[in-house]
Image (spheres, rainbow, N blue to C red):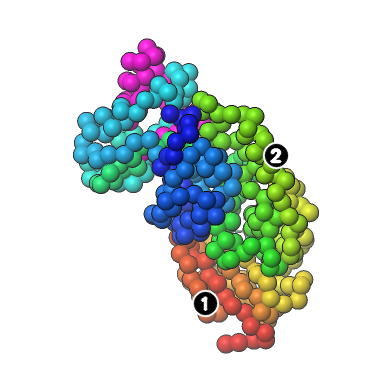
Amino acid sequence: MLGLGDRSWPLVATCTRGLEEVLADELRALGASAVAVGRGMVSFSGGRDTVIDANLKLRSAMRVLVSLVRGQVGDRGGLYDLAASVPWEEALSEHQTFSVEVAGRARAFRDASFAARVVKDAVVDRLRRVHGARPDVDRDAPDIRLHLHLSDGASSLAVDSSGEPLSQRGYRPRGGPAPLNESLAAGILLLAGYDGTQPLIDPMCGTGTFAVEAALIATRTPPSLLREFAFERWPGHDRERHQETIRRLAHVRRDAPAPIVARDRDERAVQATRRNLKAAGMDRWAEVGPGDVRELELPWGEGGMVVMNPPYGKRVGDVKKLGGLYRKIGDALKQRAPGATAWILVGDRELAKQIGLKPARRIPLFNGPIECRLLCFELYEGARD
Ligand SMILES: C[S@@+](CC[C@H](N)C(=O)[O-])C[C@H]1O[C@@H](n2cnc3c(N)ncnc32)[C@H](O)[C@@H]1O
């Protein structure tokens, strides 16, 4: 089963809410079929190669799941039987560990951890019957991650082909600081229509997430060539072929056609951005240096794209303190970015107002649990009210 074989499977790619359409476009560009947008996810279908391609190439997705079984479950017995109907012995040996994550909601299972336990029992009982031994549950680093999606209609059980979320591209040390998740940063760039042909500056680059993702897009480099995936541990995985695919993809590149510039007023952020660009193999394509957003300069003169994620301020007092910075950002955009389009991710309404410019677009997006707005400003030559 998990060897995937040659058949087509129902698949699901998950994403931050607000990026569903961008992800659907990415999937269509990959040639996936039956692409349908849901809430925080896009369903599609495809075989083994589609699963591998989706993991290596999707920029805005968080995980790629393979749906194993789907059915209506009104109570514990129904969920147990649904989970027990999957031939787990083809997927899991008694030496492997697994976990069950639960998403969605159903009236019969108000307690998600109860639903997870029912699935776990069904998997363990079936394997004990077939193998005479049981696999262990490991919540932190399991070999196989199962996803139960509960719904009052049909609930489904899927296996995660990605492992660590796809936002972990493999260039940043695990657990290192990543104020902006990579899949969200890439999704914002794609939402903004960035394709690498327009010059781009992030004047508050932090650890350089926008710069790295922009360079990956501009050079047409798949974002996840440097990492491992859960499907590499599945039975029937062809290691040789996978390595060959990675070698081939690493060659399908082009030079970045336009400048990518990153600035931050904090020298440590400048260093972090340089380090991350180098680790991602993208340092050739971005120019990084110190700079204050209040003295923003477009090195190419006019036009192009400005993208940034200024500090939000987590405490009430911070919002007051940061108001001045947001006003200055607005002034700098008005006076120093003629003809550019600016995209600013803001996590606080009051701060957003301080920018003092009327957004052409206001797109809701979630940065983890924080409901944000991606604001788009079209800037004109000279000052405008
Ligand atoms: C929320 S972080 C950006 C995170 C970044 N997008 C990333 O992925 O790492 C905000 C950044 O703005 C920088 N910053 C604050 N005030 C600034 C100013 N006046 N000019 C330039 N950068 C500034 C901070 O040093 C910090 O690195």
In the rendered image, which quarter contains the N terminus? Answer: top left
Is disc 1's CB within 8 Å of ligand 1? no
Would you identify the image quadrant in which residue 250 lies? top right
Q: Quadrant of ligand 1?
A: bottom right
Residue that numbered label 2 is attached to: 247
Side of 135 relative to 168 (left or right)? left
Please give the range of residues in magenta: 119-148
Q: Secondary structure at mark 1?
A: loop
Which of disc 2 and disc 1 is earlier in sequence?
2
The three-letter amino acid code for the residue at tag 1 is: Ala
Q: Most extreme residue toward the top, as rendered?
A: 132
Q: Are marks 1 and 2 in contact (CB under 8 Å)?
A: no
Residue 60 seen in the figure: no
Query: Is residue 361 rendered magenta in the image?
Result: no
Side of 221 relative to 311 (left or right)? right
Q: Secondary structure at mark 2?
A: helix
Residue that numbered label 1 is attached to: 360
